[in-house]
Image: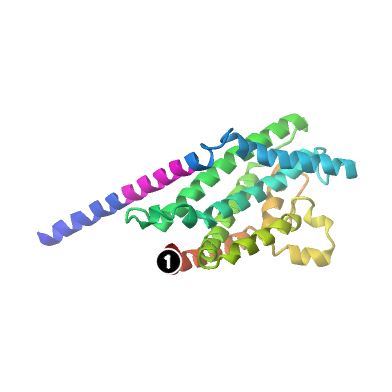
Amino acid sequence: MLLRSAQISKPAQGCTRSFATFRAISALILREMATRYGRSPGGYVWALLEPLGSIIALGFGFSLLVRTPPLGTSFLLFFATGSLPFGMYGNIGSAVGRCINFSRALLFYPAVTWLDAVLARFILGLLTEILVMAIILAGLVIMADSRTLLDIGPIVLSVSLAAVLGLGVGLVNCVLFGLFDIWMQIWGIVMRPLMLISGVLFLYESMPSSIQGILWYNPLMHVTGLMRRGFYSSYEASYVSISYVLMFSMICIFLGIVLMGRFHRDILNR
């Protein structure tokens, strides 16, 4: 009889914990939305205007230097297919990397865990980036009037890989940001030239073979290549390796989870 009671109580406890996790993540998402977008004029509009402004500036600048983009006829669409997945990776990675600092006060409550904070920022960042990407790319395809034949498979893969890669790098940085104050400044310096070597401004095939051998190990090259494969039917991006990006991301996620499990209390108490 006692054994039966124990067997019944275990699922009940699991359901209670799952509901508590759902409530915690939902509350953290609402708090994040109110803090990030609710207190600034325009709110969510800035999440759309910032990447759009960058794309317009790049497109206008390069149109003065060269006659046609490396693919298609629209400079704006070419740079959007590179900068938007790159921006998704960067924004998700930055949000996850700073989740402990943002939710520090709440993490002292037993009902809220560091994993809740990570998932809340990741989910909100992912949904926001997908919405922004869909609006901008749809608008540019319509404006370009290029009768683009979209291949949804590579586009979905590119978005998924950018999100998973951002989560993995963000988890590792979450530990490093919390343990080493200077790492945040170092990472900011590292991120600045990363856009130049991630296929946002050029095609992998246009680089010399000696440089291609180095660029291939940058997982973001594969992400931007996949996105452009989905928008340009003539572009094969044969160098892309989905398994490499997944392996890189999974290693980062594994390391991040292990390190967070070991050091999250040290980070909170600093």
Residue placed at 55% from the left, 68% from the top?
180
Mark 1 closeness class: few <14, some 14–19, many ≥20 residues within 10 Å: few
In front of the other: 42 or 164: 42
Residue at the (60%, 66%) spot, across then down: 182
Q: Is residue 167 above or below residue 31?
A: below
Along the line of sight, the residue nearer the viewer: 154 or 42: 42
For the C terminus, give its image quadrant.
bottom left
Instruction: Decide which of 62, 137 is in the foreground and name it.
Output: 62
Q: Which residue is mark 1?
A: 261
Q: Amino acid at mark 1?
A: Gly
Residue 1 drawn in magenta:
no
Spot the residue most to the left.
1
Residue at 27%, 50% in the rendered image: 16
Quadrant of the rendering where the N terminus is positioned: bottom left
Indicate left or right for 36 with 188 as reference. Answer: left
Residue 239 showing in the rendered view: no
Q: Nearer the viewer, residue 59 or 210?
A: 59
- Residue 255, position in %: x, y? 51, 67
Q: Find out whether residue 25 is within the magenta segment.
A: yes
Left-right relation of 166 to 238: left
